[in-house]
Image (tube, helix red, strand yellow):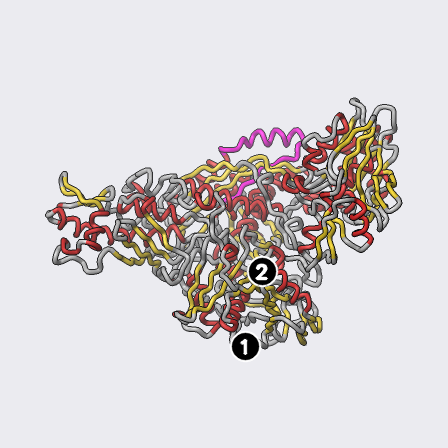
């Protein structure tokens, strides 16, 4: 389990990173997904571009109601409170349940979202939050609504010449309720079903059901789910027509328990 | 100093009770290096000029191998290049056993995914893997045998084409039990499966082979728990005499049976080192360990049991199949598991009538290897879940049905109907204590309130340290005989012990020093254990079968006793006193108020021989002694496990709320180490019960290639386990100690699934197969119409 030969590049600025991308380099941030794939020779890039030294790649900045989380911000930093306020509480709660601390020390929010593993934690939570993924391409920045960012298994709305440079979220008022439930038999196992429900004052509640071996199911108005968690979760899960009865039961349970936790 | 030879209560009562002797919870001498990351494993050893090997492995389970196209540049060796290696052949003398030749590198046929085909050699492992990736295989696929029950279907493809069908061996004991239907108050039949697992020691296998031209000797540094047996296997397959082979096992990071196996990879590295005149190393990676090598456990049982109204067993019939994989692995053979099932199925119970039939099925999977507990984990699962099914049918408790059948202490030593002899113990008392340690009434109250929570039990005994009389009949490549130990003083009085078995986590550096302290009174800090090197130690079959503390403990005690006699004679002379008037205690020879220390005795022998008596034993302060218990049918430790488990009926998830183990390992040489053994084993048993499974598709492709797919229980999945000890000495061992190494891994599946089924009983659901994953629990509920 040693990787095939590949070249390693460490761009120091964004234009250099975009140029490497244009030449076919595979971007890597914390390497918690790409590393094992390289070792197993499931990924065979000719060149890897290490994004971790780009200016502004990691870190959180707040401007008014907008919280900008650099794509290279680690799960651990978020767990440790890098994001302020109620939004930060919610994100920290999600972050601390990502795998193990050593994974969180290196893994990044942007790397995880851009990789778009259907079982990944941010893939299952960020679409429920008001905000955008910020893509940087040759023409500059482009904002993609988080609910529309992940399109499928390992598939995102990023264009081939774009890098995910930040996540921009709207700060959440103190009264925001959030329910999050995922099924892992042990830390570090890929989730078999994840759901979250976000209910903020003055806006329709949103929900996400993920880890479905497909793009996450984003529910833009989850009022019915919040009102009647059991019946509505059963209806939504049944509509997915999952083949495996266990996975269907987990999807139903995840949605219901997340909704109950958000009430 | 003198202790009875014969074990039992007398041996226990004669113990010194020194805080450093037998029975003391002495801290482990080896932990300083292990805990500071200073252990030295094969992976830490890389002489200058070492070449690394990566193996090109079979991507398919069954095929005719037509050719291997090698890359233009680079060192790639196939079977055709290494004709000096004879195939591995682990025969058994059991009647009807069909031997299989396991080639070091496949030729002609491919019989399981992961089978080595070519050795690719380069300066680094990554470059060696590049070579493997550049090879092109030409093969013609054959139908794969993925399921042991389908293996013998008429018209099945034959894995070994000169065999009449795909089975290594069948065994049977015929007894007509048909009349029991008329007289039994209860009869149950269950079909049960245990999953194929992969042993997962922290350290995988690894081998470094070097040819020493000065000694004309092959030096194989390998992660081994049975170095002398590995040496014999290497010599036989390579056509060398055993003087030309030295096996060195440095620190070994867990073995569990896996590291007793002679691997094709070891043979290939050895042959390459001789060919190339360079050190050659292969370090197993996790993918190889999971999918190609460390397979174990897969059993199927069809059990029928009859009982009277009080739960007393009237008879049991069992038809068992073990998926033995494609080859008979060296040295334990392909039939070790299945053929044992017949003799161990009765467990700790009085069984009046018994019929069995077992099959060691041959399939297109890696060879099945012995894993801690060996067949007992599956057998205990089948017996204990069947007993609970009987109890539910009779409306009696799980405790009651066990109490009705356990061998009573008054019957010890007890010989059961298949000839197993249990040495000592109070099995019903272990059961009683385990039940008493759990608030069963509280569980019943929660059940009455509608909670899906359950209470489960398992009781079992573990034969350990069984010797010549048991193994000669198997006729496998080794038979354990007299275990030998060498004890000798250095000129400054340090005691060196040399034993041929090896520690892969057992703490033998500590426990054998405690034994030496018990006999000679020497400070354990001044005892050095030399082990894990065939050039430096007497022959031993190694560390397996829960035998090290009984066998090496007995041998070290005897060697120290004889060494003490020699020292006593020299000491008496130095004291100018008659030997009869002198005694050895606390590391010195005493005569009245006068004494000479063992250090002074050693100094005299080595450096002041002019002061030795004329009639001194010329063997000096260097003794090799042999030991074997009499009888050597083995010790039987035993335990009762009690579990409270909660089932989430929406997800199928199982949470272990309470776990209690009441264990009797006889006299415990180091109770702290025994606790560690029991806890570690129980964690592995929890893996068998709930987590570990190597699934295969219909083409016999293994589907779990990483530890994200092959789930091992970790610190967050193993509950706090409460251990209570009983200490019934074995009547047959030196200090009354019993083999305890595997026990923890045997009981959990039975106890845990019984707890699950107790929780599910009100819903009419029952789990039958291991591991009891959430998906299987939900499927059981669905079968019962409850999910």
Chain to which the residue tagged by mark 1 belongs = B
Rendered image quadrant of residue B774:
top right
x and y, in percent, of residue A209 in the image: 80, 39
Chain to which the residue tagged by mark 2 belongs = B
Q: CA distance from mark 2 to mark 1?
A: 23 Å
Magenta stretch?
A: B436-459
Rendered image quadrant of residue A229:
top right
Q: Nearer the viewer, mark 2 or mark 1?
A: 1
Location of the C terminus of chain B (image quadrant): top right
Up-down: is B260 above or below A189?
below
Asked whether residue A250 is in view, the answer is no
| Marker disc for residue B293 | 2
Query: How many other residues sit within 10 Å of disc 2, few (<14), some (14-19) or many (≥20)?
Result: many
**What residue would you read off at disc 1?**
B83
Instruction: Tell which of A110 and B16 is nearer to you.
Output: A110
Instruction: Tell which of A217 and B309 is nearer to you.
Output: A217
């Amino acid at each position: 389990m040693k990787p095939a030969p590949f070249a390693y590049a460490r761009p120091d600025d964004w234009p250099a990173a975009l140029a490497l991308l244009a030449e076919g380099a595979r971007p890597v941030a914390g390497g918690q997904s790409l590393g094992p794939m390289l070792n197993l020779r499931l990924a065979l890039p000719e060149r890897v571009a290490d994004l971790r030294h780009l200016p502004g790649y990691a870190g959180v900045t707040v401007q008014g109601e907008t919280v900008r989380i650099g794509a290279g911000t680690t799960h651990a930093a978020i767990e440790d409170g890098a994001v302020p306020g109620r939004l930060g509480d919610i994100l920290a709660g999600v972050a601390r349940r990502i795998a193990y601390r050593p994974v969180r020390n290196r893994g990044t929010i942007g790397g995880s979202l851009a990789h778009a593993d259907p079982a990944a934690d941010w893939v299952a939570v960020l679409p429920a939050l008001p905000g955008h993924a910020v893509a940087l391409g040759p023409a500059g920045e482009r904002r993609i609504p988080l609910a529309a960012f992940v399109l499928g298994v390992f598939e995102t709305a990023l264009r081939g010449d774009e890098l995910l440079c930040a996540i921009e979220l709207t700060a959440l008022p103190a009264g925001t309720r959030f329910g999050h439930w995922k099924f892992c038999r042990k830390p570090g196992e890929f989730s078999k079903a994840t759901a979250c429900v976000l209910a903020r004052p003055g806006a329709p509640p949103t929900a996400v059901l993920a880890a479905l071996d497909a793009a996450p199911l984003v529910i833009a108005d989850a009022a019915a789910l919040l009102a009647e968690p059991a019946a509505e979760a059963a209806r939504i899960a049944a509509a997915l027509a999952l083949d495996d009865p266990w996975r269907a039961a987990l999807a139903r349970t995840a949605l219901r328990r997340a909704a109950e936790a958000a009430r | 100093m003198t202790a009875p030879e014969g074990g039992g209560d007398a041996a226990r009562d004669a113990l010194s009770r020194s805080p450093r002797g037998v029975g003391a919870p002495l801290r482990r001498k080896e932990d300083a290096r292990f805990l500071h990351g200073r252990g030295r494993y094969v992976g830490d050893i890389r002489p200058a000029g070492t070449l690394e090997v990566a193996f090109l492995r079979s991507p398919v389970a069954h095929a005719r191998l037509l050719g291997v196209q090698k890359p233009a540049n680079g060192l790639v060796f196939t079977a055709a290049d290494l004709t000096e290696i004879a195939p591995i052949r682990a025969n058994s003398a059991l009647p009807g056993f069909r031997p299989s030749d396991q080639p070091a590198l496949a030729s002609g046929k491919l019989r399981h995914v992961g089978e080595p085909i070519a050795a690719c050699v380069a300066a680094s492992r990554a470059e060696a893997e590049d070579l493997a990736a550049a090879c092109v295989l030409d093969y013609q696929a054959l139908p794969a045998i993925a399921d042991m029950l389908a293996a013998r279907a008429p018209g099945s493809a034959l894995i070994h084409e000169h065999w009449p069908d795909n089975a290594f061996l069948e065994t049977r004991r015929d007894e007509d039990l048909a009349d029991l239907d008329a007289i039994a108050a209860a009869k149950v039949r269950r079909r049960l499966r245990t999953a194929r697992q992969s042993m997962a020691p922290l350290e995988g296998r690894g081998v470094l082979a070097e040819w020493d031209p000065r000694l004309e000797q092959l030096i194989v540094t390998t992660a081994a728990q049975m170095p002398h047996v590995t040496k014999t296997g290497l010599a036989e397959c390579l056509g060398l005499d055993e003087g030309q082979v030295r096996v060195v096992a440095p620190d070994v990071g867990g073995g569990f049976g896996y590291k007793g196996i002679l691997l094709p990879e070891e043979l290939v590295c050895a042959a390459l080192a001789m060919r190339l005149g360079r050190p050659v190393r292969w370090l197993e990676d996790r993918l190889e360990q999971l999918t190609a090598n460390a397979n174990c456990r897969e059993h199927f049982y069809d059990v029928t049991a009859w009982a009277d109204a009080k739960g007393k067993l009237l008879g049991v019939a069992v038809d068992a199949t073990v998926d033995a994989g494609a080859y008979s692995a060296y040295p334990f053979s392909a039939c070790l598991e299945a053929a044992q099932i017949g003799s161990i199925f009765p467990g700790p119970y009085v069984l009046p009538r018994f019929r069995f039939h077992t099959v060691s099925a041959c399939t297109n999977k890696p060879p099945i290897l012995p894993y801690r507990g060996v067949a007992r984990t599956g057998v205990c699962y089948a017996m204990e879940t069947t007993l609970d099914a009987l109890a539910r049918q009779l409306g009696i408790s799980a405790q009651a049905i066990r109490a009705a059948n356990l061998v009573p202490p008054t019957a010890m030593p007890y010989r059961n109907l298949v000839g197993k002899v249990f040495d000592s113990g109070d099995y019903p008392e272990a059961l009683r204590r385990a039940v008493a340690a759990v608030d069963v009434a509280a569980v019943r109250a929660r059940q009455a309130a509608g909670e899906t929570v359950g209470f489960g039990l398992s009781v079992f005994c573990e034969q350990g340290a069984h010797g010549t009389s048991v193994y000669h009949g198997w006729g496998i490549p080794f038979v354990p005989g007299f275990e030998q130990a060498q004890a000798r003083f250095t000129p400054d009085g340090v005691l060196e012990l040399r034993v041929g078995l090896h520690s892969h986590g057992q703490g033998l550096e500590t426990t054998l020093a405690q034994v030496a302290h018990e006999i000679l009174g020497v400070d354990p800090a001044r005892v050095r254990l030399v082990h894990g090197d065939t050039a430096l130690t007497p022959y031993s079959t190694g560390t397996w079968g829960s035998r090290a503390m009984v066998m090496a403990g007995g041998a070290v005690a005897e060697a120290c006793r004889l060494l003490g006699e020699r020292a006593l004679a020299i000491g008496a002379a130095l004291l100018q006193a008659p030997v009869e008037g002198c005694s050895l205690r606390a590391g010195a020879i005493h005569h009245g108020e006068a004494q000479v220390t063992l250090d002074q005795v050693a100094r005299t022998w080595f450096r002041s021989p002019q002061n030795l008596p004329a009639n001194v034993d010329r063997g000096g302060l260097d003794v090799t002694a042999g030991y074997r218990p009499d009888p050597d049918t083995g010790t039987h430790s035993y335990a009762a496990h009690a579990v409270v488990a909660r089932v989430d009926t929406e997800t199928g998830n199982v949470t272990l709320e309470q776990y209690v183990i009441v264990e009797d390992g006889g006299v415990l040489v180091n109770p702290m180490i025994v606790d560690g053994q029991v806890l570690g084993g129980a964690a592995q048993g929890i893996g068998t019960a709930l987590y570990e499974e190597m699934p295969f598709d219909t083409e016999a492709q293994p589907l779990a290639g990483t530890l994200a797919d092959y789930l091992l229980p970790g610190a967050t999945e193993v509950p706090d386990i409460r251990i209570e000890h009983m200490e019934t000495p074995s009547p047959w061992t030196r200090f009354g100690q019993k083999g305890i190494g595997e026990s923890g891994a045997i009981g959990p599946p039975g106890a845990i699934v019984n707890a699950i089924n107790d929780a599910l009983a009100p819903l009419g659901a029952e789990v039958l197969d291991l591991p009891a994953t959430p998906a299987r629990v939900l499927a059981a509920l669905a079968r019962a119409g409850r999910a």
